[in-house]
Amino acid sequence: MTSPDKGARPVAVVGAGLTGTSWAALFAAHGREVRLYDRDGDRARAALPRVRQAVEFLVSHDLAPESLARVGLEALRAVSDMAAAVVGVALVQEAVAEDLAVKRAVFAEADAAAPPDAILATSSSGLSITEIQEGLPGAARCVAAHPYNPPHLIPLVEIAPGTATSPETVEKARVFYESVGKDPVVLARDLPGYLSNRMSAALWREAVELVLSGVASVADVDRAIASGPGLRWAAMGPHTLYHLGGGDGGMRGHIEHLGHVKEGMLRDIATWTEFPADTVDVLEAGLADALAGRSAASLERERDEALAGFLMARAAAASSAGEAAATGSGGKAALPGAADNQVPLLPMVVQSAAGVAVEVAPGVTRTTLATGSRTMLVRFELEPGTAIPLHAHPHEQTGHLVSGDAELVGAEGSWPVQPGDSWSIPGDTPHGARSVEGAVIVEAFSPPRDDYLPAPPSVAPSSSTSAASTEPPG
Ligand SMILES: NC(=O)c1ccc[n+]([C@@H]2O[C@H](COP(=O)([O-])OP(=O)(O)OC[C@H]3O[C@@H](n4cnc5c(N)ncnc54)[C@H](O)[C@@H]3O)[C@@H](O)[C@H]2O)c1
């Protein structure tokens, strides 16, 4: 069998229902060998076509690298027992029925059979990882990793430790989920509903109340979110948006001017903690009107297409906003003096670059030093305690630690490097770096990326063909 993702270890998904199927698709799409196990073997086998379909969807919408997805699809299989599922795995993603006794039994079985360094993660929406891990020899490696449905499309995963979970497990889980394209949010502790479902529950209670009290129909309440705040929330979270809503005064200005209005609403909105008796009947009638017989499958297709579109648009917006922040303009910069600076007849044509730093993660800046027809040279500067998020290039790349301290991070672990060390990383391999004291790293990779092109210089570029003469690498 092909070794997925250049030696990355397999992943076991336990439970082949809605959530497990979607997790399996995400992991396979990022090149992992996935073993899908369900106590009902027919369910696991029947889920495989749905997993494949979801992987194809991700690839066709540029949400997963095709080369890795092909490897993951080739390795994907259903297995008939836990022992076979967990051999050699990096992580067990539990997605069985929402029942504490069932989850505890599954965790006990996985803990006994999985490699000692494998992470055991529950998808549970409402059960406590502290209760699930209680009494297990491997309690320290158990963690909550709560997805938002559908996990292969929604980037969020909420990672929460139980009282016996080790900090190393939380960090390993964070790195693992980043390596498969997730946007992990780490909570300080485990609490019912994590962040996302608590906020969803608060919103939904008011949505139900607005229908039950006759203010608006089910269809109109849904539109009031999907065509309004929901669109904004897909771009940014509520705190950032209200900060923007405060104009020059930011968040302080917003609360000073509009806080009393919000407080008036808070006094008025629903506070019940049990669904009123007529809730199901009223919502079902409202949905029947709103959906006019549309099937769940057709609604799911529309939802998934829209989600994929948002994700692609958001990535494009973040990339062009980064370039605009660096240039002070709204557009993507063209490489200055490209024709003038090219040196013909050299096997690799290098041209000087403006050397404008773009912040690519908090405290991490990337400066494009030079680009050629085949290769690009970039410099990363990491402030103390920051990290370059996991990313991959299609071909092999080389890197060099110029100064400071750094740890290279891969999907499976990390490697400390010293100033003067160089390394090479195979194509399509997720990698990043982090630094405790701060670091300067130079990377060369191919092919050059358009979105890494430097901003136009504020002064005329030098005519030198040496990248280092424009922006010394630290
Ligand atoms: N559905 C969602 O929107 C959603 C979102 C986030 C998290 N979750 C969480 O994911 C988990 C699964 O939910 P779901 O909606 O996918 O459920 P589901 O009913 O669709 O699937 C559960 C699967 O687990 C299998 N199973 C049950 N006991 C088992 C055992 N002992 N060993 C192996 N397989 C077993 C069942 O046969 C079934 O195929 C729950 O904990 C839920 O809270 C669900």
Image (cartoon, helix red, strand yellow):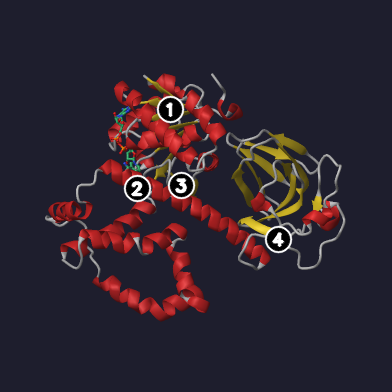
Which amino acid type corresponds to the residue marked 3 in the rendered image?
Pro
**Where residue 277 appears, x then y in whole percent?**
12, 55
Mark carried by residue 155: 3
**Camera-side mark, 3 or 2:** 2
User: Which residue is painted at 49% across and 77% down in the image?
Assistant: 247
Q: Horizontal placement of 43 versus 77: left or right?
A: left
Whether pointer 1 and pointer 4 mark residues with C-beta atoms closer than 8 Å, the reply is no
Residue bearing mark 2: 302
Residue 467, horizontal then vertical, whole percent: 82, 52
Q: Which callout, 2 or 1, points at the residue further toward the start of the chain? A: 1
Q: Crowdedness of circle 1 by 10 Å Cα count: few (<14), some, many (20+)?
A: many
CA separation in Å, label 3 and label 4: 30 Å
Report the amino acid beneath label 1.
Asp
Q: Which mark is nearer the camera, 1 or 4?
A: 4
Q: Residue at x 44, y 47 (%)?
A: 308
- At a point 46% along the width and 47% down the height, the residue shown is 155
Q: Residue 444: image x %, image y %?
A: 74, 43
Residue 296 as seen in the image, left or right of residue 156: left
Please say if 359 is above or below 110. below
